[in-house]
Amino acid sequence: MNISEATIDFVCKHANDDVRKLALSAKRTEKLDLSFALDQIAGRQKARTKLPSWYALAALGEGVDEAHFLVFPPHISMEQCSSEQTARYKKRILDRLLPSILDHPWSRNTHFIDITGGFGVDFSYLAQGFAEATYVERQEHLCEIARHNFPLLGLPKANVICKELDSPLQLPSLGAALQETIVFIDPARRDTNGNRTYAIGDCIPNILDFIGELLNRTAVVMVKLSPMLDWHQTVEDINRASGSGNAVREVHIVSTQNECKELLLVLSERYESELEVHCVNDDDVFVFTPGEANSSISESRSTEKLFVPNASVMKAGCFPEIEARFGIRQIGKNSHLFIGGEDIVGFPGRVFNILCVTTMNKKELKSALAGIDKANITTRNFPLSPEQLRKRLKIKDGGDIYLFATTTDEEEHIIYVTGK
C-alpha cells in the first residue's frame, strides 16, 4: 500500500491521542500522509472495543513496518462494519450447519464467496477453513485494504475482486451449478444517492431479483439485513421470490448488550427443516419454531417475579412462545412483561423480584414508594415516558430499585416495584 515510515511512526506516537485535536495541531510534512494516519488512529481506537482481536493484532511498537501494519478504513466503514462478536456468531452458524448439509468435510472443495465485502470483518471470520475464499467489493480503496490485511488475518490465498455486481450470478465461479458454494450477502442499505433504506427490495443489490437462481447453484446463502426490518415480512418476501416457498431455514435476531444489531437469514434447499428463529443477546439464546405456542399456559400460584425479555425477543415478537415455553404470563397483551412464581433457568432476559404492585392512586403510590428516593424506571404501554413518570413521582435516577410501569388488559395503569 506504500505506507511511509513517517506515517507509521506518527500513528505509533499518537495512537491514544484525540484525533480531532491532532487534525488541528499536527505538523504537516512531505512524507506524512496525515489524513491516512488520522484514519488509522481513529480506527485503532474504535477497534479496541468493536474488534478487540484486531486491535491486539494491530499493536504498535518500535520497528513496525508496512508488511505488519494492519490498516483500518475511513470512519464510515468502521461504523458500518460488523463487530467481532457478531462476526464470530455468524461463523458458529456455518460451523454448525455445514457438516449436516455437505456430504464431505466442509473444508474440502468448498468455496466461500462474500459478494459485499466492505471492510472485510465478516469475511475474515467466515472464510477461515474453506478450500477457496473470494471477497468481492465495488470500492477500490476497500479492496486495497483487503489485499493488504488478509495475509495478516490468516487468509493469504483469499481472492479479492473489485467489481460492482447487480447479481452474484455475474461471477464466473457461479456461472455453472456449484453445489459446494457458500455465499454471504450484506446488501448496502443506502440507495445510489446515499439515502438510507430499509426495505429489502430497496437495498443494493436487491436479492429478490436473483435469490431463486442463486439457491439452485449454492449449498447455503447467508443474508445480513437491517434489524429494522419486520422478520415475518422479510421471510415471506424471500420465500416468494425464491419460488420454493420455504427457502429461509433460520432467522437469527442478533443483539449485543441488549441492543438489536443484525437480522440474519440462512437460506438453503439442501436440507429439510421447520423454520427456526434464534433470539440472540450476547450468550443468551432463545430458539423457537413459529407457531409452537399452545393455548394451555399454566397459571402461576404466585406472582413474585417479573420477567423482562431481551431486545432480540422483543424484535421477534415471540411472546406466546415465551408464555408456553416457560409457563409465565403477560401482564397485558401490549406490555411485553411477564410474571411468574418460580425462578426459570434459561429465560432470555432479566428477572426481578416483585416487592409490591401499585396503581397510580396517590395514597397507594405513597405507601408503595415509602423510603424510595431513587430508582430505575421503565415504561411499557404506559401514557407517560420514564422521564415524565420520574418527574411525577419525584424520584431520582439510579439505585437498586426498578420500577416497571405498564397497562393491564383491563386498561389499568400499574407500577411494579422490583429489585434484582
Image (cartoon, rainbow, N blue to C red):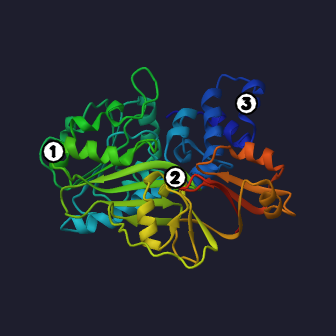
For the residue marked with disc 1, what is the amino acid? Answer: Gly
User: According to the image, label 2 marks what residue?
Assistant: 334
Real-space Cα separation, disc 3 to disc 2, in angstroms: 45 Å
> On the image, numbered disc 1 is attached to which residue?
243
Callout 3: 10 Å neighbours few (<14), some, many (20+)? Answer: few
The tag earlier along the polypeptide, 3 or 1, is 3
Q: In this view, does 62 lie to the left or right of 323?
A: right
Q: Is residue 129 something that shows in the picture?
A: no
Mark 1, secondary structure of its residue: loop
* SS class, disc 2: loop
Residue 32 sits above or below residue 411 on the image: above
Identity, as a three-letter code, of the amino acid under mark 2 = Asn
Residue depicted at 24% across the width and 57% down the height: 110
Give the Cα distance between marks 3 and 1: 52 Å
Q: How far apart are marks 2 and 1 (CA)?
A: 35 Å
Residue 303 falls in image quadrant: bottom right
**Which three-letter amino acid code belongs to the residue tagged 3?**
Arg
Residue at 55% from the left image edge and 39% from the top image edge:
79
Tell which tag, 3 or 2, sits nearer the viewer: 2
Q: In which quarter of the image is residue 188?
A: top left
- Decide: is 201 above or below 307: above
Residue designated by label 3:
20
* Quadrant hosting residue 371: bottom right
Relative image position of residue 132 (x, y in whole percent): 28, 53
